[in-house]
Image (cartoon, coloured by chain):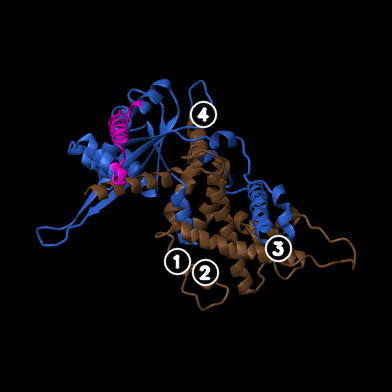
């Protein structure tokens, strides 16, 4: 999605440039957290705009339009709005389940829909590992397997399939550990889990700082 | 600060020197140096051996560490060197696996339908249900008319083992091996080192890492497939991929 399209309005590169995050968020390999943060910031903007449209307001700071003049202020349920936004503007279930897609013919709409679909999967994955919820993480692996295969990233698609095979074939104790042992919590507290390999990277970085200072 | 203090400790300075340097924030105090030295010198393998003896579930997490040692003046006979190492951690399972009795025979995967490995409508609905909460968090933060309802939105999506996952993990830095994981012989040595921690235990353990580490470990196991014993065939180690590199690759691919 981050191809050379900064001049095309509404593309990810253009939007990142508008919020001043393009330089840091361009390359996930150099700075994954900046890239993820930029991507999710754009996604949150899309969600807020979609919710405003659902509620009939033009700006997030506006009040709801009065249906009855001089009557009580209308109320809206946040979960109802969120449900409508999720159905229309997050993941595309037809794409995941292999069902036929409706071709709207609107390229801009399709692009925005794909952007929200990918960001929704990323935010779900990040939240799943922060809570240490094993089955949720493995569910995201299943969905990502399809994206890796569609984008010809064969290695990760094959590893995701091998993970499914391991879950089906390994002894129950290992399956349990493969499900619930994917994260570590270095501080303690809810929502503070990290993937094992990310913690290993932190340890490696500390180690390099120490030996670098000693050299 | 601690690593500078270790260099000074090697030179055997007087106590007054530590006190003076501590006052100007160059080093930690003398007592802190002694505590740090005793901590570094202790047997880091002891917790892992205790876990193996007690039958506690744990897994290995490993990754390569590459440090480039450059030189100021590069000549044909004097140039920088890349030092390849492998860092190994052991992480105790916070959720102990259920105790199963009897022998386990792996099922025949060829009998499973291809749809078994694909997402189901129920799984997609579960993802959407979680997304409702995540979206509600965003909306209550940024939209004025919904801000008053932020207390209704859960801060953490609960699951079966939320309480255990909120506990701090027991992590042991097992070793930093001077081995290059790219070379097959070194990878075999690394895996034999991991087997050394397990002793005579026949219980299988996970070895988590990134995709490349897993590929190299699988390659090492395939190389030793003709070994006489399960230990020589490295059957006790089951390589698997961790999650952070998966998200990294997903963002690259997106």
Labels 1 and 2 positioned on one and the same chain:
yes
In the rendered view, tell whether residue A32 sits above or below residue A21: above
- Contact, CB < 8 Å: mark 1 with mark 2? yes
Mark 4 vs mark 1: same chain? no
**In magenta stretch: residue B33:** yes
Residue at the spot of label 2: A16
Residue labelled with disc 3: A51
- Residue that badge 4 annotates: B97
Give the chain of mark 2: A
- Residue corresponding to mark 1: A26
Q: Distance between the residues labelled 2 and 4?
A: 44 Å
Left or right position of A196 against B46? right
Q: Chain B is drawn in which colour?
A: blue
**Same-subunit check for callouts 2 and 3:** yes
The CA span between labels 2 and 3 is 21 Å
| Residue at 65 percent of width and 69 percent of height | A103
Q: Give the residue at the far bottom of this rendering.
A: A7
| First to last magenta residue range | B22-46
């Amino acid at each position: 999605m981050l191809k050379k399209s900064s001049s095309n309005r509404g593309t990810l590169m253009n939007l990142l440039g508008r919020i001043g995050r393009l330089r840091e968020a361009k390359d996930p390999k150099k700075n994954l957290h900046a890239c993820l943060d930029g991507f999710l910031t754009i996604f949150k903007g899309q969600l807020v705009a979609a919710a405003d449209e659902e509620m009939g307001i033009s700006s997030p700071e506006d009040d709801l339009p009065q249906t009855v003049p001089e009557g009580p202020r209308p109320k809206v349920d946040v979960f109802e709005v969120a449900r409508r936004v999720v159905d229309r503007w997050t993941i595309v279930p037809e794409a995941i389940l292999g069902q036929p897609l409706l071709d709207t013919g609107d390229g801009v709409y399709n692009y925005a829909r794909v952007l929200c679909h990918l960001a929704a999967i990323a935010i779900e994955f990040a939240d799943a590992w922060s809570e240490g919820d094993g089955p949720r993480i493995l569910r995201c692996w299943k969905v990502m397997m399809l994206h890796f295969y569609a984008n010809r990233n064969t290695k990760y698609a094959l590893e995701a399939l091998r993970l499914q095979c391991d879950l089906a074939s390994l002894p129950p104790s290992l399956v349990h550990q493969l499900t619930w042992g994917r994260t570590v919590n270095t501080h303690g507290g809810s929502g503070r889990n990290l993937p094992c390999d990310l913690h290993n990277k932190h340890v490696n970085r500390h180690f390099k700082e120490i030996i670098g200072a000693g050299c | 600060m601690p690593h500078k203090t270790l260099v000074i400790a090697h030179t055997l300075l007087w106590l007054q020197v530590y006190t003076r340097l501590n006052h100007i924030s160059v080093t930690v105090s003398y007592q802190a140096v002694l505590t740090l030295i005793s901590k570094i010198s202790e047997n880091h393998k002891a917790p892992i051996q205790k876990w193996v003896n007690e039958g506690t579930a744990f897994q290995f997490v490993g990754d390569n560490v590459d440090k480039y040692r450059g030189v100021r003046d590069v000549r044909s006979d004097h140039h920088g060197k890349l030092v390849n190492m492998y860092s190994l951690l052991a992480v105790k399972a916070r959720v102990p696996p259920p105790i199963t009795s009897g022998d386990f025979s792996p099922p025949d995967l060829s009998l499973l339908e291809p749809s078994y490995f694909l997402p189901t409508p129920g799984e997609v609905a579960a993802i959407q249900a979680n997304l409702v909460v995540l979206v509600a968090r965003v909306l209550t933060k940024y939209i004025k008319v919904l801000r008053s309802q932020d207390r209704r939105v859960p801060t953490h999506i609960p699951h079966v083992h939320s309480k255990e996952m909120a506990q701090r993990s027991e992590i042991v830095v097992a070793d930093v091996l001077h081995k290059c994981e790219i070379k097959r012989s070194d990878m075999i040595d690394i895996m034999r080192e991991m087997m050394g921690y397990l002793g005579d235990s026949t219980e299988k353990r996970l070895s988590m890492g990134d995709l490349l580490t897993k590929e190299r470990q699988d390659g090492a196991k395939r190389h030793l497939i003709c070994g006489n014993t399960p230990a020589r065939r490295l059957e006790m180690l089951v390589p698997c991929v961790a999650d952070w590199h998966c998200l990294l690759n997903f963002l690259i691919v997106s």
